[in-house]
Amino acid sequence: MISLIIRILIGVAAGVACKFIGDLIEKQLLKNRELEFRRVKHENVLFIIGSALAGGLITWRISSVVEMCYIFLLLVTVVVIVEMDIHHRVIPNDILLVVLVLKLAFGIPYLFGMKAFPEFHVASSIFGLMVSFAIFIAPALLAKQVGMGDVKLAAVMGFVLGFFGCMTAIIVMGFLVAGYTVLQRDMPVLTMVKTMIPMGPFLAVAMIVVLLLPDTLFTINI
């Protein structure tokens, strides 16, 4: 019990570290785009709390050290995606490429029999990428509520999670969006409809949530 508590506390600290590493990366990406780094105090506190909770959950749920490292690195990219999309409606291709590289770097060893690494099923990942892209490209072409950055992020998420994982993530995202909408219930309906809700944060958070769900949910792989 004590060892578990210590492990969770280490995860909390690692989660907070991921938040500040993400901030440093975001600042550099914004500088490259000549955009201003913006953050208000209460928002910064919320991000720290969220990252700390995520870190604690990672060390509680995941036993493999290699897989822990993988998800913590993904958490850094999620911090960058969430913060940049909220403030600037930008999801950098650089970060999406990093997510793909992380999946391949930690997934390919599994294909060669190294079971300490996260599972990687190539067909499922490719199918997940294609299906996620198809699901998000239609509303992106027909409406303004989904941007092309969201479409690319959805495709990357599909590759990372595989088919069944990305379907679960889309459901999780739906619940997150519904919760957000409830919190915004005081906003006039027409204004809320016309306002672009950034999908990036919901997709990115849903990806981390699915990675922490029991493996038994994804025992069938294409």
Image (tube, rainbow, N blue to C red):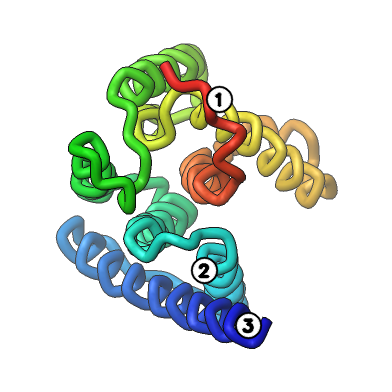
Label 3 amino acid? Ile
Which of the pair 33/84 is nearer the observer?
84
Q: Mark 3 highlights which residue? A: 5
Q: Mark 2 highlights which residue? A: 59
Which of the pair 47/123 is nearer the observer?
123
- Numbered badge on residue 167: 1
Give the structural element (helix, strand or loop) at label 2. helix
Question: First in sequence: mark 1 or mark 2?
Answer: 2
The label nearer to you, 1 versus 2, is: 2
* Left or right for 101, reference 192: left
> How many tags in the picture?
3
> Measured from the top left, where is residue 138 in percent x and y?
46, 12
- What residue lies at 58% left-to-right and 30% top-to-bottom? 170
- What residue lies at 47% left-to-right and 73% top-to-bottom? 15
The label nearer to you, 1 versus 3, is: 3
Question: First in sequence: mark 2 or mark 3?
Answer: 3
- What residue lies at 76% left-to-right and 48% top-to-bottom? 184
Label 2 amino acid? Thr
Label 1 amino acid? Met
Q: Is residue 177 above or below residue 6?
A: above
> Measured from the top left, where is residue 160 in percent x and y?
36, 37
Question: First in sequence: mark 1 or mark 3?
Answer: 3
- What residue lies at 41% left-to-right and 60% top-to-bottom? 64
